[in-house]
Image (tube, rainbow, N blue to C red):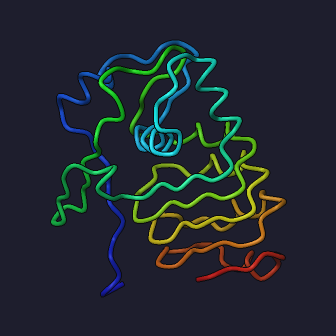
Amino acid sequence: MAGIPRPYFLRLQYFDMVNLHLEQTPPEHGIPIHPLIALAIRNQFQRLPSTAYDWNHVFSKIKNLSLELDRKTVCRWEDGTNTAYLIAPDEYPPAEPFYYCMGDWSVIGRMKQLKALSISRICVEDFSFLTQCTALERLSLCNTNFSDCRLLLQLPKLKSVDLRWCRLEYTEVLESVSFSCRL
């Protein structure tokens, strides 16, 4: 699609990956947290949780989550490869059983009070976490690599969705939904 900006692949700089233990084997029964989600939590609550209890408590409180790339989240852009290098959310990994993982967004499904989710200009490896967001009312996936519209059928409280600049599949399901859809 000519003229439409492509979403960015997210990376961390090597020394940040080492400091956050991304190269190590994750703990057994661990819970992955994408560093961009940790940055959003830090920006929203002015600090990162320090214990596993605190992480779970924060997840239970989040009603709005906005995952966007800006000067608070990105330290370097490579437009030629559509890569954005994230700022490390902290100098240390989170308390176990949590750990940082660049390819896993499933912790969003633990946010049971989440009513509004916005992900913009980002390549997300797997959107299946959306099926766990049963309280979600507003969803914006503008300019992401989201494609499978069937996932939206599993969001019972959804009122509006923004899918502009997404390459969509199974768009016929959008004809049978009760929420407003911006394409």
Q: In which quarter of the image is residue 160?
A: bottom right
Which quarter shows the N terminus?
A: bottom left
Residue at x 29%, y 56% (from the top left corner): 71
47 to the left or right of 82:
right
Which residue is situated farthest in the bottom direction here? 2
Which quarter shows the C terminus?
A: bottom right
Q: How many labels does the image show?
A: 0
Residue 57 or residue 99, whichever sits in front: 57
* In the rendered image, the vertical position of residue 144 relative to residue 32, given as above or below: below
44 to the left or right of 170:
left
Q: Position of residue 97 (x, y in %)?
A: 54, 16
Residue 114 or residue 78, whichever sits in front: 114
Q: Where is residue 145 in the image (x, y as percent from the top left)?
A: 46, 64
Q: In which quarter of the image is residue 147?
A: bottom right
Residue at x 24%, y 56% (from the top left corner): 83
Q: Position of residue 176 (x, y in %)?
A: 82, 78
